[in-house]
Image (spheres, helix red, strand yellow):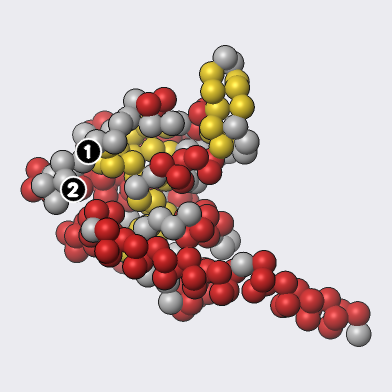
Amino acid sequence: LRASLGLNDEHLLILQPTWVVARKGIELAIELVRRLRAPQHRPRLLGKEPVLVISHHAGDEGLAYLVKLQALAGEAGVPLIYAAEQFAAAPGVAGGRKVYALWDAYVHADFVTYPSLLEGFGNALLETLYFRLPALVNRYAVYAADIAPQGFDLVEIDAHDDPNNVGAITEETVDAVIEAAIDPVRRRRMVEWNYQRARERYSFEAVTPLIDDLLRGMAH
């Protein structure tokens, strides 16, 4: 997969596993990668080169946002790989080229960005926790109200404090991301804690009794 994206083990694959629409706040992911690529951080990243990979399609709201992001990344010197054509719900072949499952993107990712400004819940965030990946998340309303209180260990930002949605990425944010991505002890502690918390609250085993209770209540 990395080779098909033009990457190797010397790249830090930062995955944006969302559709390309404005409410996903992908400008924040670009700003994060821009800061990570600063010369002073390269030794801390063990020489790895940060690259942002988008795994989902644009087009639901037109292509203007994708074009804007590509221009922004170019100006910031951020390698942005729009790889939607290389992923599908299941692996296969399309147009004579191998297509990977979305799960493969998670398996090969080093870090996940989820800087959404607005979400109904956050399925990609649950996928990230399932695959035991460290992540940056913006404190969108539903996250702040329903998910954050569950006690997950994530790098949090709050873009709503900044009208340009960029000031939320601070040097403290960058420090936290580097530690979560590179330090094996910090990384393992974070992802295992998050996996267990998600298992306790959002697994089939956790949810099924709640659904049973709801159905019994409806029956009465």
Indicate the secondary structure of the residue bearing disc 1.
strand
Residue 184, by quadrant, is bottom left
Residue 160 shows in the view: no
**Going by the picture, which residue comes out furthest to the top?**
96
Residue 107, by quadrant, is top left
Q: Quadrant of the N terminus?
A: top left
Indicate the secondary structure of the residue bearing disc 2.
loop
Amino acid marked by disc 2: Leu
Point 57% across, 14% down: residue: 96
| Circles 1 and 2: CB atoms closer than 8 Å | yes
Count all numbered tags in the image, as a single digit: 2
Q: Quadrant of the C terminus?
A: bottom right
Residue highlighted by disc 1: 49
**How many residues crowd around disc 2 within 10 Å: few (fewer than 14), some, or many (20 or more)?**
some
Residue highlighted by disc 2: 45
Q: In the depicted view, which residue is nearer to us: 146 or 23?
A: 146
